[in-house]
Image: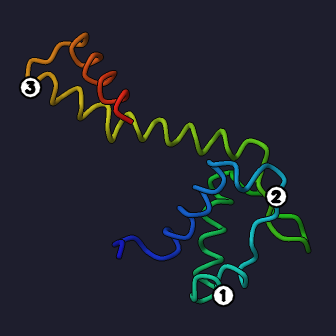
């Protein structure tokens, strides 16, 4: 089980759906009650997850209708993920390569080889 608070886990799951396009621009988000039933959590927890995404500028509130995915949401999610990818993976990779005296052309060749195995 993750050490993250449940509302953050739910927000991450919804963010994944937005990033993948499964929840597209203009789509209605599940309601607080729908999320609560699905995840077996308190409605306050679900509301906090939705509020997190709203605060990140991924959702808009439509009075009496619910929350909807903004047209810019997928691009924002992907941009954040790219930044995180660089921070979490690329920088440590480059630091380790430097410690091992692996030069950029060697690293590129190693990546190409590994990619061919996928």
Identify the residue at the far top of this view. Answer: 105
Q: In terms of image quadrants, where is residue 39?
A: bottom right
Asked if the residue under mark 3 is in contact with the one under mark 2, i.e. CB atoms within 8 Å, the reply is no
Q: Give the residue number, with chain letter if any, for mark 2.
A: 27
When the figure is inspected, residue 43 is found, relative to residue 117, above or below; the finding is below
Quarter that holds the C terminus: top left
For label 1, count other residues whose C-alpha is less than 10 Å away and answer few (under 14), some (14-19) or many (20+).
Answer: few
The image shows residue 80 at horizontal and vertical percentages of 52, 41
Q: Give the residue number, with chain letter if any, for mark 3.
A: 99
For label 2, count other residues whose C-alpha is less than 10 Å away and answer few (under 14), some (14-19) or many (20+).
Answer: some
Instruction: Using residue 59 as the reference point, say whether residue 110 is left or right of it.
Output: left
Disc 3 to disc 1, how far (Cα)?
50 Å
Q: In terms of image quadrants, where is residue 35?
A: bottom right
The image shows residue 32 at horizontal and vertical percentages of 71, 79
When the figure is inspected, residue 76 is found, relative to residue 64, above or below; the finding is above
- Residue at 77 percent of width and 55 percent of height: 69
Task: Kindly state the secondary structure of the residue where label 1 is placed.
Answer: helix
Q: Give the residue number, with chain letter if any, for mark 1.
A: 37
Residues 22 and 116: in front is 116
Task: Kindly state the secondary structure of the residue where label 2 is placed.
Answer: loop
Quarter that holds the N terminus: bottom left
For label 3, count other residues whose C-alpha is less than 10 Å away and answer few (under 14), some (14-19) or many (20+).
Answer: few
- Residue at 48 percent of width and 36 percent of height: 82
């Amino acid at each position: 089980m993750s050490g993250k608070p449940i509302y953050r886990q739910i927000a991450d799951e919804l963010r994944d759906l937005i990033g993948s396009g499964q929840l597209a621009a203009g789509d209605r988000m599940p309601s607080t009650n729908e999320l609560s039933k699905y995840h077996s959590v308190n409605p306050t927890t679900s509301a906090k997850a939705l509020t997190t995404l709203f605060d990140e500028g991924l959702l808009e509130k439509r009075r009496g209708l619910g929350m909807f995915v903004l047209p810019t949401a997928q691009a924002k999610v992907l941009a954040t993920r790219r930044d995180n990818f660089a921070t979490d993976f690329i920088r440590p990779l480059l630091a380790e390569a430097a410690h091992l005296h692996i030069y950029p052309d060697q690293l590129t060749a190693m990546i190409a080889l590994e990619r061919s195995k996928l």
